[in-house]
Image: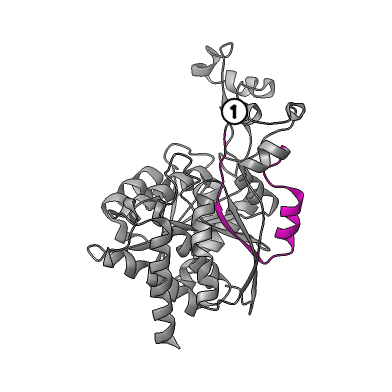
Amino acid sequence: MLNHNTIKIAVLPGDGIGKEVIEAVLPIFSALSLPITYHIGDIGWDCWVNQANPIPEETWNLINQSDTILLGATTSKPEREAKAELLDKSNLNVVYTSPIIQLRQKLDLFANVRPCFAINKQKQFNFCVIRENTEGLYSGFDYDHLPDDFKKIVSEVPHWNDKINEALSCTLRINSETGMRRIIQFAFEYALKNNHSRVSYADKPNVLRKSSTLGRAIFEEIAARFPQIQADILNVDAVGMHLVTKPEMFGVIVTENMFGDILSDVAAGVMGGLGLAPSANIGLQKSYFEPVHGSGPKMKKNTANPSATFFSLSMLLSYFGHEKFAHIIKNAVINIIRENKTVTRDLGGNSSTYEMALAIIEEAKKGADKNA
């Protein structure tokens, strides 16, 4: 999508297995002489515990000086548990915000891109879930009690009027025209660039009749500009079922924040598990790429599958116009998994993170030699 001769990357290993998979993948930079320079920064739980800030100021400075971010994984906990672990209890008035949410909101990374493709040969599919990243049910309007300003609206509905004096929690799903327009436009452009012939908008218009109207109208308007692409609007629950039973029917699935969160993890399961699932978070100026498996705090050391991190690096290279290297790395991972000799436990093997990563790097070097 972009074209940078040399990409400046902020490498943020983060927490838990994030550190392991990043450390295992970094040697491929020199092994393939990738057009990359990088600096390592701090992010995550240790930063929160020690500084009451999961993304220190020096890390923001590194991000601002870099073209993009390669992220390992970060730990995030509820507010009460987060504050309980602060070393300096004088910081208890600080509000905890997950580093992932901070990155997405402060950098305005509105598009979460989760490709899902067949690795084993038994069944062929190739689709992508594109999730709006900054609005929807995760907009931040989340209350453990019903705000007074909402009570009049709620009391006008007979079913809820009887409960108005009970303890009521509330979350507001809010989508803007700007937000919906740019994510749907992004989805069609992504489909065109990546040879997908279908874009499906996943929502719940049969139940959320009013709030679904805006997205539906924008989707139909933008779809009309792409007559070469099949476009349809589907109920999100039906999409979830068909992802499991008939994933080959989809091209690009575009949806709002929470629905996309759920569908993209279903897609990871279809692909073979979170250890295989890469992602990109894209904005107009910045981006970051990460495996979606999380920090795995209960996993044994050196057992995490590094595949998703390699796939995420492949996405990064493709995004910055280095398609040859992107394909070499992606194909190397697929070949090692299909060979089934040097794979981690989640794939049925006994290899460590570093053993599998080394096998992938050696396979990538062979691929690079063939393309030389």
Asked whether 132 or 49 is in front, the reply is 49
Residue 356: percent from left, percent from top: 38, 62
Residue 234: percent from left, percent from top: 39, 50
Asked whether 216 or 4 is in front, the reply is 4
Asked whether 156 or 285 is in front, the reply is 285
Apparent side of residue 160 relative to residue 229 in the rendered image (left or right)? right
For disc 1, the neighbor class at 10 Å (few under 14, some 14 to 19, many from 20) is few
Farthest-out residue, left: 122
The residue carrying mark 1 is: 81
- Was residue 57 drawn as part of the magenta stretch in this picture? yes
Farthest-out residue, bottom: 372
- Was residue 300 drawn as part of the magenta stretch in this picture? no
Dot 1: element: helix
Q: Is residue 77 above or below residue 62?
A: above
For the record, the magenta segment spans: 52-77
Apparent side of residue 223 relative to residue 351 in the rendered image (left or right)? right
**Residue 131 seen in the current view:** no
Apparent side of residue 127 relative to residue 97 in the rendered image (left or right)? left
